[in-house]
Image: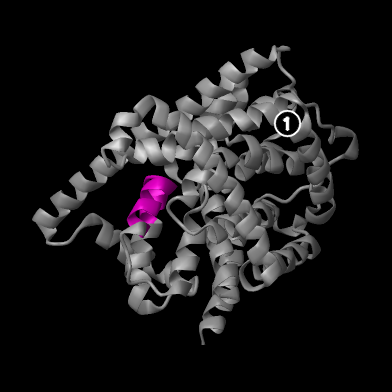
Amino acid sequence: MTYLISIIGLLVVFVLALIASNNRKGIKVKPIILMVVIQAILGYVLLNTKVGETIIRSIANVFNKLLEYAASGVGFVFGDVINNGGYSFFLKVLMPIVFISVLIGILQYIKVLPFFMRIIGFLLSKVNGMGRLESYNAIASLMVGQSEVFITVKKQLGKLPKHRLYTLCASAMSTVSMSIVGAYMTMIEPKYVVTALVLNLFGGFIIASIINPYEVDPKEDIIEVQAGEKQSFFEMLGEYILDGFKVAVIVGAMLIGFVALMACIDNVFDLVFGVTFQHILGYIFAPVAFLMGVPWNEAVQAGGIMATKLVTNEFVAMQELTKIHTFTPKTLGIISVFVVSFANFSSIGIIAGAVKGLNEEKGNTVARFGLKLLYGATLVSVLSAIIVSLIL
């Protein structure tokens, strides 16, 4: 019965994407079916096989080691707080972003990261039926982040039509940056983080292929990566250290604001209506959670986590998820995969602002289709969660 519900959920996702499509006759069915099959195979391998277990353990070990290295730097600066036994989300979860940002900068500087992004993007374009630029951008979003990625394709932004710009932005919102993957792994199981990264990569193209189908002229499908000014190695290190710190501070500031606001709204609703705002949102999102494969007796609570992620961000949702110890392992896996993405209202402003900083006209275009962007990215998260529900 649960499998039947999940299959119905898949059909609902495709129908909802089809409703928002701007060119239903242009939808290519074959690449979509192929990518769904690839999602299912990769998800099964990662979650249900010894090979997948080994891959995830290896990735988790790498990030655990990176977090240990980061902790040595954090401990040097904030040693008294840590030595006195105090736990700080900012120090233990967000500060390691600075170190991982530095590693990304080094891999960028020695040209290793751009090489892999080009190769994987080229291979991906053979599967998704889209352009090489779109495929490169999806990999780049995963590696360098949802706002930084547009710097790498700065030369093309002014030439891109609205439909191609939508796909680039959809990739940026559907994935997450490697710089904060380590932070996620401190809150939810690494296997769900890794699985979500892989599934969302393909899911972004699946949903975009339905909502926003188009043909790419091979002559226009040229990747001109913006190299930027030549920096010395230590100039680059300084820049990425500060960039990582900015990300950590921004995420911390957003958490302070969103968590406080949610607590305030919850309290007001509880005083006036006798029920919290998050509980109300839970009932609204419960049918979606149910179609994702969550049992109905857990759907309201799961729906509350989903709604929290949408209206605030994934960090707040993950924090809420860590407080719940009554979910079955399957429900925990489904919701964990759902929350690993940048699909929330604040991302609309982040992406539009990043593009506008490089090209004002295109930034205004992104702002106009912002809600449609969020709609598609949320469907990607739902799709990934349903695939996981069929596997677990």
| Image location (x, y in percent) of residue 104 | 64, 32
Q: Is residue 333 left or right of residue 295?
A: right
Residue shown at 73%/31% (left/top)? Answer: 160
- Residue nearest the observer in this picture, 27 or 52: 52
- Residue nearest the observer in this picture, 271 or 177: 177
Instruction: Find residue 231 and report its image quarter.
Output: top right
- Residue nearest the observer in this picture, 145 or 172: 145
Report the predominant secondary structure element of the magenta stretch: helix
Give the magenta-colored segment's residue range.
307-321
| Image location (x, y in percent) of residue 38 | 74, 65
| Image location (x, y in percent) of residue 331 | 44, 71
* Residue located farthest toward the right when viewing the structure as drawn: 219
Q: Is residue 122 left or right of residue 178?
A: right
Q: Is residue 226 left or right of residue 253?
A: right
Residue 12 falls inside the magenta stretch: no
| Image location (x, y in percent) of residue 303 | 37, 64
Residue 21 in view of the camera: no
User: Which residue is labeled 1 in the image?
Assistant: 160
Residue shown at 53%/62% (left/top)? Answer: 382
* Residue located farthest toward the front when viewing the structure as drawn: 83
Residue shown at 74%/41% (left/top)? Answer: 134
